[in-house]
Amino acid sequence: MLIATKSQFFLVRNLLPAFLFAALLALLPSPILAQAPGAAATTPATSPTTQPKTFINYFLPTPPHGELSTNVWGAATVGPRDSKNGLEDETMKQWNYWDGQIIKAPDGKYHMFASRWNQARGHGGWFGSQAVHAVSDNLLGPYVDKGLCWPNDAGGRGHNVTALALPDGSYAIVISETRPCEVYVSKSLNGPWEHLGTITVDGDPRWHASNVSIMARPDGNFEFTERDGRVFISDKGILGPYKAQGDSVFPKGIPNLEDPCIWYSGGLYHILVNSWSTRIAYHLTSRDGIHDWTNRGVAYDPREAIVRYPDGTVNHWNKVERPSVFIENGRVAAMTLAAIDVEKEQDHGNDGHGSKVIVIPFDGAALDLDLQSSADSPKP
């Protein structure tokens, strides 16, 4: 017996007793049964699509140090916030802060290396910024400014400040942009910091970089990237000379990329890079840190809920730049970002506007696991 149409289906159902109709359905081939009105579909009409997670999905809620406050400097659009998070001048009468790299000392204290300048000069005062050292008992802050890293060298001048632990157990601070790519070293995070020298690039004696982000690779070499998106590797120590590994690895078609941050975790090399004009940053990965950099999507956007508190309150800074990661046990545990409450040209100094370094907890273990699962999944 063939039930080919919907009308035939209803005719048979109405003519036969219920028990005979049920027996008939049991004998029908599954393709015919699947077409019967009222029968459960074996496949959905449209398969639900799940958007893949990107870096922005791994930011965690930021526990505040007490009550959130609106009685702080900054534009009202930022929202109620925790002024004890990260590094800031709560009075906004002395300093604007920028950059921000955290390293944990053997005694459990957290050391942040950043830049600062007189807030009275507005945001444009960054060109005269100085490198500073700040300390906290808590990863999220508050960080206490301990002063200049090298007060007797070039007036403490330094911008694009970043820092790293070296393979021999000592530490290095690297600066760029306002000075040649200078390296300072110390056996202690508390200093004193000694000028080691200037990073050099093979075949380019006049090389001068900005936005340098540097790391010690698992193979013992050093690697850095900079504003133009090229990666450089040295097998002769932190000062180099470094060799360029090719053209820019930044994704094409995205304007005004800057402020790269490079690191290694979960078996992959990572770069975050920020588009200053769109305010959106992107996450790139590579297996060897040289070739086949893949754009994984949005890393952060200040218009999204990257700074959110457990009660659901969200902060919206005008811009967040200079990303840096704090790695613990081989995973990203937190991110630092330089945050400003208004457009940079609207920070004129002595006007209640300015910048600080914020610290946001991050689920790096989940990020690494998901990226590994994605890499291990069969390709179509």
Image (tube, rainbow, N blue to C red):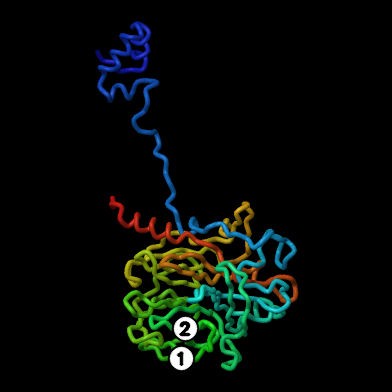
Q: Position of residue 234 (x, y in %)?
A: 35, 83
Q: Which mark is residue 172?
A: 2
Residue drawn at x 58%, y 80% as measured from the top left: 133
Total marks placed: 2
| Residues at discs 1 and 2 in contact (Cβ within 8 Å) | yes
Residue 346 is drawn in which quadrant?
Answer: bottom right
Residue drawn at x 61%, y 83% as measured from the top left: 129
Q: Position of residue 217 (x, y in %)?
A: 36, 76
Vertical placement of residue 237 versus 80, above or below: below
Q: Residue furthest front?
A: 107
Q: Amino acid at mark 1?
A: Leu
| Residue linked to disc 1 | 196
Q: Position of residue 54 (x, y in %)?
A: 45, 57
Secondary structure of the residue carrying numbered label 1: strand
How far apart are labels 1 and 2 at the CA level?
9 Å
Residue drawn at x 44%, y 79% as measured from the top left: 165
Q: Amino acid at mark 2?
A: Ala
Q: Position of residue 66 (x, y in %)?
A: 67, 61
Residue drawn at x 60%, y 71% as measured from the top left: 357
